[in-house]
Image (cartoon, grey):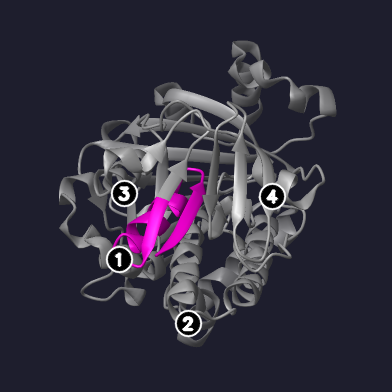
Amino acid sequence: MKKIVIIGAGISGLFFANLLRQDSNFEITIYEKNNSINLEKGYGIQLSTNSIKLLNKIGFQNLNLANLFNPRKIDFYSLLKKNKICDLDISSFNTEEAKYTTMQRSSLVEFLIEKLPSNLIQYNKKVSKINSTIENIELVFEDQSSAICDYLIISDGIFSSTKSLLLNKDIKPKYFNAIAMRGIINKKDLNNIDHSNISLFLGSNFHSVIYPVSNNNELNFIGILRKNLNEDQLEDYSLFDDKDFLSSIISNLSNQIDQNILNNLKNIRCFPIFTSQEISKPKQKNIFLIGDAFFAFPPTFAQGASQSIEAAFELYESLKNNNNEFTNKRIERIKIIKKRSKFNYFVFHLSNPFMTFIRDLTMKNLVKNKKFTDHYLGKIYKN
């Protein structure tokens, strides 16, 4: 029986553990540096069909339907012109078993945790040393305890200290020169949009997304604003909880976002967006990175959670079949999605009136072009 240690109890690590639990050839332990897993409500995620069909392998299709939503379209709006540009039918990529899904992140994490034995996750465990040989890996934790395993899976997020320790260098993500503002808004406070679809608003150096996360009356709001911050600001974690800073961001957006939306947003949070600078590839054949520890994307293709799930499944298949294809295949996938994410970011944030006119005209034609949508989205959603 192979002993597998997973560092980090995020979506990717938890899903990977659920897959391994289906195979008696693996003994699993998850080590989490925090004293609990964050199950705070209010953080929505989008899951395209490529991840839903993988989640169904561990029973996701049996989840209470009240805890998720299946939008049919993405409605694109111009914040400059205050009009709808076009809509994209994302349900065309659905199957009877796997449909594009939006939900609370906490609902997905709860689902993944509930399927695991309570003693499988050990908390307050931060790795301080890694000793690896061809045969096995020894982990030493800050509390001086240790563990030995055959495979080490690093899944502790974009700020992974374990990855830096493994590669013997301080690997820091790159500030994306943008900040995100999240909140919740009630259906009754939203006018002139279809509450059953994803609404994507394109502005000047800004875009926002509103979508349902369950079958109740609340919708998730996220806005992405280009914003230069210096090193001191980025290191000041209290800045993003500061009411004056948040007020300045809201004031900055007041000429773009409908005032009715700004007035009715609840539980507003603001945070900087970081992405990976490069792809890290461990030299050891028995150590792997998954999730944001492998690579963190800009949030403009809505594939963060889906790719974390995909990566976990690809690694599971690789270990089960005893092949070495995982890392190279994942790198190729990352390159495609990174390119699309950056392109979306550029297109969504255009501010020149002539460029936005060309963009809007082009989008109206492209969303109706099946060959384009199959290539741009279907290539990702169907894999």
Q: Are marks 2 and 4 in contact (CB under 8 Å)?
A: no
Q: Amino acid at mark 4?
A: Asn
Stretch of the chain drawn in magenta: 1-28
Q: Which residue is mark 1?
A: 24
Mark 2 falls on what kind of element?
helix
Q: Amino acid at mark 3?
A: Leu
Q: Which residue is mark 2?
A: 374
Q: Quadrant of residue 41?
A: top left
Residue 81: x %, y % from top left: 57, 49
Comes first in the chain, label 2 or label 3: 3
Comes first in the chain, label 3 or label 1: 1
Q: Determine the CA span between mark 1 and mark 2.
A: 39 Å
Q: Determine the CA span between mark 3 and mark 4.
A: 30 Å
Q: Which residue is mark 4?
A: 131
Q: Which residue is mark 3?
A: 112
Q: Determine the CA span between mark 2 and mark 4.
A: 46 Å
- Given this view, does label 3 or label 1 mark the residue nearer the observer? 1
- Given this view, does label 2 or label 3 mark the residue nearer the observer? 3
- Given this view, does label 1 or label 2 mark the residue nearer the observer? 1
Please give the name of the residue rendered at 66% of the width and 27% of the height, measured from the top-left corner.
252
Mark 4 falls on what kind of element?
strand
Mark 1 falls on what kind of element?
loop
